[in-house]
Image: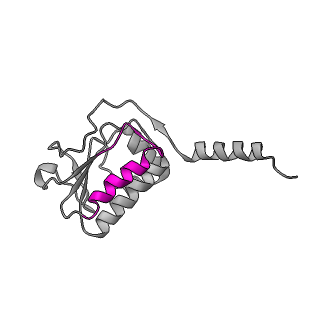
Amino acid sequence: MARTPAKASRRKRAATDVASADVDAAAPESSTADTAVADSASAIVPGASQNVADVAVGPAIALEANCTIKEVAALRERLCAVVATSGPVMIDASAVERVDTATLQLLHAFVRDRLGGDREVTWRGVPAALTDAARLLGVRDLLCLPAAS
């Protein structure tokens, strides 16, 4: 029995909705400007943690409140601009309220490429929404997210 286009479309939408692993959580409002911050963060060094005061602070990438596939192209451009910088790159996730699979995949590729070149990534203000979504998809450790405090 052949599938009708409408049924196939509904199934595809349903599968996409399930696979996106969107997580909603309340997070404090924050500026999303790309600025360096001096607040504490965990340095991404395999097997070690440092305070940002112990590490030179380089460029910062502030994530938007809604990190979805609609915004992933703009985020990719910002990440590509700093992927090869020699100093540490800080990802400020304090504004994140919602994050989907596409964003997590992009963040993983960025962290993987940085670590592969022995370059640091630091995280600031990682909310439960990001941690929970990364845990659900099994990429929390791959993103080198700091331990929950």
- Image spot of residue 125 (x, y percent): 27, 41
* 66 relative to 83, above or below: above
96 and 148: which is toward the camera: 96
The single residue placed furthest to the bottom in the displayed view is: 117
Answer whether residue 79 is magenta in the image: yes
116 and 59: which is toward the camera: 59
Q: In screen coordinates, is 92 left or right of 137?
A: left
- Which residue is located at x 45 percent, y 44 percent? 133
Q: In terms of image quadrants, where is residue 84?
A: bottom left
The single residue placed furthest to the right in the displayed view is: 1
* 55 relative to 25, above or below: below
Answer whether residue 80 is magenta in the image: yes
- Image spot of residue 59 (x, y percent): 20, 52
Q: In screen coordinates, is 91 left or right of 140?
A: left
- Which residue is located at x 50 percent, y 40 percent? 22
33 and 101: which is toward the camera: 33
- Image spot of residue 92 (x, y percent): 27, 44
The region drawn magenta spans 62-84
Residue 141 visible, this orientation: no
133 and 99: which is toward the camera: 99
* 105 relative to 96, above or below: below
